[in-house]
Amino acid sequence: MKPFFLAGRWQKSSHSAAVHNPYTGEHIADVCLADADQVEDAVAAACAAFSESRRSTADARATVLENIARLIGERRDEFAAIICKEAGKPLSLAAAETDRARLTFRFGAALALGDDGHGIAVDASKPGAGHLGLVRRFPIGVILGITPFNFPLNLVAHKIAPCLATGNAMIIKPALKTPLTALLLAEVLEAAGVPAGQIQIVPFDHEHIDALLHDSRVAMISFTGSDTVGWKIKATAAKKKVALELGGNAAVIVEPDCDWSAAIPKIAAGAFAYAGQSCISVQRIFVHSSIYESFRVELVRHTVENLVPGDPASASTLIGPMIQPAARDKVVRWVEEAISAGAKLLTPLRVEGASVLHPVLLENVAKGSPVICQEAFAPLAVLHPYDTLQEALDLVNDSSFGLQAGVFTNDLQKTLLAFETLEVGGVLINQVPTFRVENMPYGGIKDSGFGREGLRYAMEEMTELRSLIIARTE
């Protein structure tokens, strides 16, 4: 059984979870699961490590982060292969995720050397005369990071890198469907010189999470996953800092002034690549009525001809399996319910093997249907025409989610209107909402989350401002 990384050592337990290839069903490995005593050991080790890491120098933190980035680069093919195997992510996308993770740690190294404080003009008011003011950020302590299956390396990196850059300590609970990538990263952390106990990769059952949410030694929860689980965590851990990166049903708007034909490959890839298993996957496509018919014909043609699911280990594959049969079957039921309610299916509803679903395009979907109101997390998108940009903006906002949205237009005024109107964490112009780079602020509003990731912004979440006011005595 594969051991986990706790207190700077590789440890085993009597319980395990099986990891399977979602495309072939092959049993890949058995991974040890920490028991209650070992979870307690992880917290104690993190607390001990934080007593040292909080005093670490910027240079030491940056050096470790640079080492991690270098070692990820050296083991790039190994990371890509294991992501492909355990997550079913197409190999080209798995390699791209590995490259992104390397950059995440490089950005963290640069920011670790940055300025973490500033002066304040205390004497801007009469009571402050004769005083000097400074503000600095300090690490908060032990952080519990809970990560999902769909980006088993880079979403772990987006928690660990800012943690190391700020001198905190962290326990990572990786998704039990994809723990092998995180454990491979633990090998890199060990080799890079991360102090024992500062970062621990510890798979364990969900039953142990509640105790950590109530543990006063855990200062923060950083969770990426479903909105249902995320908001329960926030309600339970009311006195802790909480950062939530949750779900979405991301939308794009296509205005007639853009080169909409050139936008179709982007939109199709944003909807269907990696079987749509991203919280910012394109799920709702709003197209101006003057170009709707032509756009629909071309999008359907492009999807059917170019986006055929296949073996994720093939370099040419863009769409692999969904993570498990139950996830696919749920979405198939949603599609069949939508069709029964009057929706029109534009692509064949095809399933293959245990978990493969071919891209699904729908139109004429009834308001309130799960395929537009809920997060599909699948290769599914819904087309809808509109007459005015304001109507389209209102349709995008008519959602309980608000993560990112894309608008295809070459009109500056429309761009500004979209930026001011859309109720999302990020507005992307002439780009799909699936787009993300590591140093941008990333997060949502409404049910899509709380707080922001992206290196600098996650570092702010993981630190507290502290003021120093000095009265002159002369």
Image (cartoon, rainbow, N blue to C red):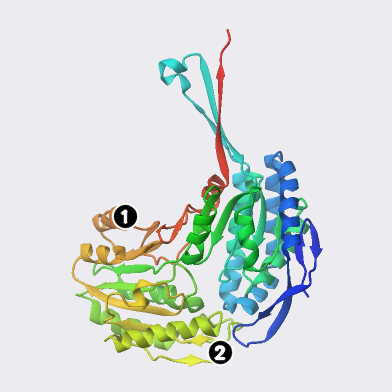
Q: Position of residue 361 (x, y in %)?
A: 36, 83
**Label disc, if present, on residue 191 of the rendered structure:** none
Which residue is more in the foreground, 65 or 208? 208
> Number of marks in the image?
2
Q: Secondary structure at mark 2?
A: loop
Instruction: Report which residue position mark 2 lands on.
Output: 354
Distance in Å between CA atoms under marks 2 and 1: 42 Å
- Residue visible at 28% across and 67% down in the picture: 258
Residue to which mark 1 is pinned: 419
Amino acid type of the residue tagged 1 in the rendering: Phe
Determine the secondary structure under disc 1. helix
Badge 2 or badge 1: first in the primary sequence: 2
Q: Residue at x 52, y 87 (%)?
A: 356
Question: In this view of the protein, can residue 103 be seen by the observer?
Answer: no
Residue 80 falls in image quadrant: bottom right
In the rendered view, would you say 311 is above or below 417? below
User: Vertical placement of 465 versus 96: above or below?
Assistant: above
Answer above or below: position of 311 versus 89.
below
- Indicate left or right for 309 with 17 as reference: left
Q: Is residue 229 left or right of residue 403?
A: right
**Nearer mark to the viewer, of 2 and 1:** 2
Q: Quadrant of residue 383?
A: bottom left
Q: Is residue 146 visible?
A: yes
Instruction: Give the amino acid type for the residue marked by disc 2 in the picture.
Output: Ala
Q: Residue furthest top?
A: 474
Question: Which residue is drawn at the image coordinates 80% and 64% (left, top)?
Answer: 10
Quadrant the C terminus occupies: top right
In the rendered image, residue 221, in percent from the top left (x then y), is placed at 58, 54
Q: Are marks 2 and 1 in contact (CB under 8 Å)?
A: no
